[in-house]
Amino acid sequence: MSRRDAQTDPFNAGDPTMPWDSEPLDAGSSDGHASQEEAAERDRKRSETAKRQSARRERERSTTSSPKSKTNRDTHDTAKSKDDKRVGCETIVASIFVMFVALCVLIGIVALFMVSCSDSDTGTSGDTSETQSRAFDYDTVQSLLIEQEQDVLEQRLDALAEKDEATVKQVAGHIDADFAHYDPELTLESVGIDPTEIARWYLDHTTYDLSDSDETGANFYAYTDDGNTSWVCRAFFHVTAPGPGSVTWNLASFAYNLKQQHDGMLTDADKQSIRAKLEELEGQAEQQDNYVSVDFVGTCDEDGSNAKATIDEDSWDKVLSQVYSTFC
């Protein structure tokens, strides 16, 4: 049996005979050359097929193991994203806080600057704000000034009753001047009498009334016609004291007559006579009612605050002169 016949028997066939297992043909034979090319082409295709199968198996293995890996990657990415968001939020909050603090500091600096400027222009900003917030009230200021007039005048009259040392000297000066008015060469001291002694006697017999009675009471006034800050204040009241004409003036007349009798000279006997005459006149003196007035200077701020009534010292001195001397 030939080789070809043996290959056709499937039970007795050996290994298959591949094209390249054939005996090489003659180089010049065209069939042999074609068989070699076909063999090379098949080798190339088998190589490409093997590569594709290898790549497919690799993808399958990758696909089988990827779910877990993908889950791990997703978890990692999610955690990282959360951390990034948290850090971002913290950064934003910190930035906002820093800007808020900076804004507060800036506002504080501006406020201090404005207060400083206000103080330099108007003295004190708190006083200015309070002044601007109040409206001027004429009746309220008037009442405050009148109350102060009453208080100040009562203090002065109490000083008369208590024979305050300064008040005694002031009254004594008016009595001595009244005595010397009769004869400028005669003074109380020159006739042996202390002016403060007579002043104390006058004050011991002085009364006053600051009540609101119609006959003997006091009247207080306060008004302004020069804006709101300057006020004219005045008090009218009664003071009762021994009439200076019946004591001081009569004593001066008695002393002058003695002086004339002794050629302008007073003897010790004359001075004793003058003292005795003083005691006589004091015993005979009659009380005299004097309706007098004293002025005050009233002031207040433009808004009506700090109302104050201050007694006019010259006006008060005229009151004492009117009460304790014959010639005011």
Image (cartoon, rainbow, N blue to C red):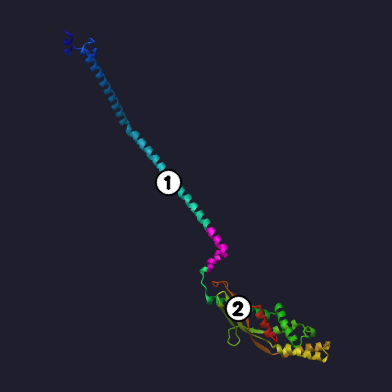
For the residue carrying disc 2, how many other residues have a C-alpha within 10 Å: few (<14), some (14-19), or many (20+)?
many
- For mark 1, give the secondary structure: helix
Q: Specify the amino acid type for callout 2.
A: Glu
**Residue 119 position within the rendered picture, expressed as x and y whole percent measured from the top left:** 56, 62
Q: Which residue is mark 2?
A: 149
Q: Residue at x 44, y 47 (%)?
A: 92
The residue shown at (59%, 79%) is: 233
Magenta-colored span? 111-131
Q: Nearer the viewer, residue 201 or 316?
A: 316
Give the vertical position of 215 relative to 108 (above or below).
below
Q: Does residue 193 belong to the magenta stretch?
A: no
Disc number for residue 89: 1
Mark 2 in CB contact with mark 1 (< 8 angstroms):
no
Q: Quadrant of residue 283?
A: bottom right
* The stretch drawn in magenta includes residue 118: yes
Name the residue located 37 percent from the left edge and 40 percent from the top edge: 78
Q: Is residue 106 above or below residue 154?
A: above
Disc 2 element: helix
Question: Picture quarter containing residue 227?
Answer: bottom right
